[in-house]
Image (tube, rainbow, N blue to C red):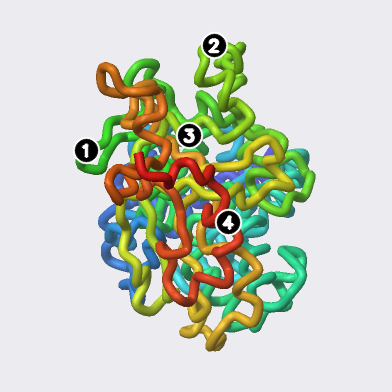
Amino acid sequence: MDKMKRFFLPVVILAISGALAFVSCTGDDPDEPSVASCVGCHTNYEHLQAVYTPDTTAPAGGCGGEAPHIEPYDRVYMGGEGFEAYKASSHYEVGCVGCHNGVDNTDDKVEAHSGEFIRHPSMYYEEKCGSCHADIANDFTTSLHHGTGQKRKVTIRNGLAGAHEFDQLPAHQIEGYNANCATCHGTCGNCHVVRPPAGGGGLSSGHNFNKTPDMLNVCVTCHTSRGGHAFLGVAAGTQPDVHLSSNSFKCLSCHSGHEMHGNGEPVDQRYAYTELPSCQDCHTGIQTANIYHSFHYNTFNCQVCHSQDYNNCGSCHIHGAGARIPSYLGFKIAKNPIPDIKTEFNLTLVRRSLAAPDSWQEFGVAESSNFDAFPTYNFTTPHNILRWTTRTQTAPGATCYSNCHIRNEAGTLVNQELYLFQTDLLEWELDATAPITVDGQLPTSWFDPQ
């Protein structure tokens, strides 16, 4: 018995000492984790304020303007209901270093963020997310949110073959793309864990993984200048999209998660993607719903009649002067710029795009070598649909085409402003965009004096 006492007593004392040491590291509250740990540090707001590193550069805001400033310690603070939900989730069980690498159980900030630390693990989504979400990660490689279509235009305009050659662009240009364009064209975390960089970045809900992204704080944050701006009816003189005002639709009412994640099939651009929603998904039988649909169903896209004016801008000088054609409301009908994809339409709505020959001047490319490969106006489907618009609602006694066909009234071409003519283009846009203008494409009778 004495031998057993001599053996067990030191072990018990050692165990008690270890337990006391653990409690002493956590502070006065035994339920509060120590700041010498990932969770302890990032749930202790005062400690984060004491050890944070100030920003040295402001994040690029993207097309929607400057990003809002969020303090560094607020961006990484884990607290509130979001954190409680995160603690109860399977993602929490993975552990901080399981996704971020780094070193746990240290109060040395430098050491904690060493060991191949990854600030945004979903940048390496194939490894970090794909270990559990293999199907989504595999498909996301060709997702439009991953920037495939945009990368394709950048590479082709700079003399390469397509998106698959993006990595062959000059390193400084790739750096510029990542610092600017990729503020919205991001990865899994930008939708499900953090705010997009264009929204200021940082944890959006205490590190909780939000299966359904918040429409305003995620979707509209990136799609603010176009999709969100139009859908919410922000611009003076416009109204919210009827799908919002009448049906309280959100983005995911039409755009499914499967669409966002991709289906693994590479596409040249977004309108070639087979998972896109269409008006006909809900509005069945519209081809013969009325005389206007019957006549024009295969002539142009629905938005030609049912969209309001929408945002345009252009001539972006990336990381320099920005958009030198500032945002403006406009409405232009042109020849279909993608007839190989949207084969059913002769005329479509188009939107002025950002690209210019010297867009990448700040990143070592004085002028794109193959800029004229694409028009400066893109096929567009504005999210600002109304049943009654300035084209569908005519005055009593007027003809059905009074607000859309061009007519010559004593030398004045009424409705001419609705169409894209070569005279609407700047000199540097002509070679690229003249092929989709309507010059010589409209009935000559439209221009005859009435």
Q: Which residue is mark 4?
A: 436
Q: Tell me the element at label 1.
A: loop
Front position in the image: 422 or 179: 422
The vertical placement of 261 against 248, above or below, is below
Q: Which residue is mark 2?
A: 289
| Alpha carbon distance from label 2 to label 1 | 29 Å
Residue 238: quadrant of the picture: top left
Front position in the image: 211 or 331: 331
Please identify, in this view, whether the residue under mark 3 or under mark 2 is nearer the observer.
2
Q: Tell me the element at label 2.
A: loop
Instruction: Identify the residue at horizontal 32%, vertical 58% (top origin).
Output: 327
Amino acid identity at mark 1: Gly
Give the mark nearest the N terminus, 2 or 4: 2
Give the mark nearest the N terminus, 2 or 1: 1
- Residue 237: which disc? 1
Q: Which residue is mark 3?
A: 303
Residue 368: quadrant of the picture: bottom right
Amino acid identity at mark 3: Gln
Give the mark nearest the N terminus, 1 or 4: 1
